[in-house]
Image: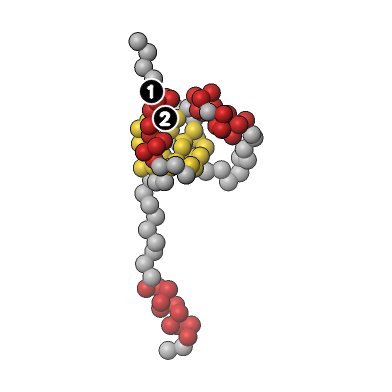
Amino acid sequence: MDPQSSQRSRLQQRKPESVPQIKRSDPWFDDGTVVIQGGDTQFRAYRGILAVCSPIFHDMFSIPQPTTGEELVDGCPVVHVSDSADDWQYVLRALCERRCG
């Protein structure tokens, strides 16, 4: 067997890497304007609420973003964060699910 055939054979035997399945979590607002992704979990929230409550988001959203190659989910830009999905769930629920009354 020639070296190229052997290499092709090994490449064909490799199993494709599994791509993590992205989960949607609470809060997920159908009319939200931005998707926050922590790990394999996404949250759809309101850009304006995040900007008002967080100087980091305020500054990030005030910078013009490139329109080509932008990752979108349901037409909303995706912001990848390094914090855990559990942490973001607590933060977003506190910010977006305030109850009046």
Q: Give the number of callouts.
A: 2
Q: CA distance from mark 2 to mark 1?
A: 8 Å
Q: Secondary structure at mark 2?
A: helix
Q: Position of residue 14 (x, y in %)?
A: 38, 70
Q: Name the quarter where the C terminus is drawn.
A: top left
Tell me the residue at 37%/13% (across/down). Answer: 100
Query: Which label number is shown at residue 12?
Result: none
User: Which residue is nearer to you in this view: 16 or 92?
Assistant: 92
Query: Which label number is shown at residue 92?
Result: 2
From the viewer's perspective, tell me whether residue 69 is left or right of residue 33. Answer: right
Figure check: 6 above or below 31: below
Q: Is residue 72 visible?
A: no
Q: Residues within 10 Å of mark 1 (few under 14, many from 20)?
A: few
Q: Quadrant of residue 16?
A: bottom left
- Which three-letter amino acid code belongs to the residue tagged 1? Glu
User: Which residue is nearer to you in this view: 61 or 21?
Assistant: 61
Q: Position of residue 8 (x, y in %)?
A: 44, 77
Query: Which label number is shown at residue 97?
Result: 1
Kindly indicate whether the residue at mark 1 contacts the one at mark 2 (C-beta within 8 angstroms). Answer: yes
Q: Position of residue 42 (x, y in %)?
A: 41, 39
Q: Earlier in the sequence, mark 2 or mark 1?
A: 2
Q: Position of residue 87 (x, y in %)?
A: 39, 37
- Which three-letter amino acid code belongs to the residue tagged 2? Leu
Task: Please identify the residue farthest to the right as the structure is shown.
Answer: 64
Q: Name the quarter where the N terminus is drawn.
A: bottom left
Q: Quadrant of residue 41?
A: top left
Tell me the residue at 37%/73% (across/down). Answer: 13
From the viewer's perspective, tell me whether residue 34 is left or right of residue 99. Answer: right
Tell me the residue at 41%/77% (across/down). Answer: 10
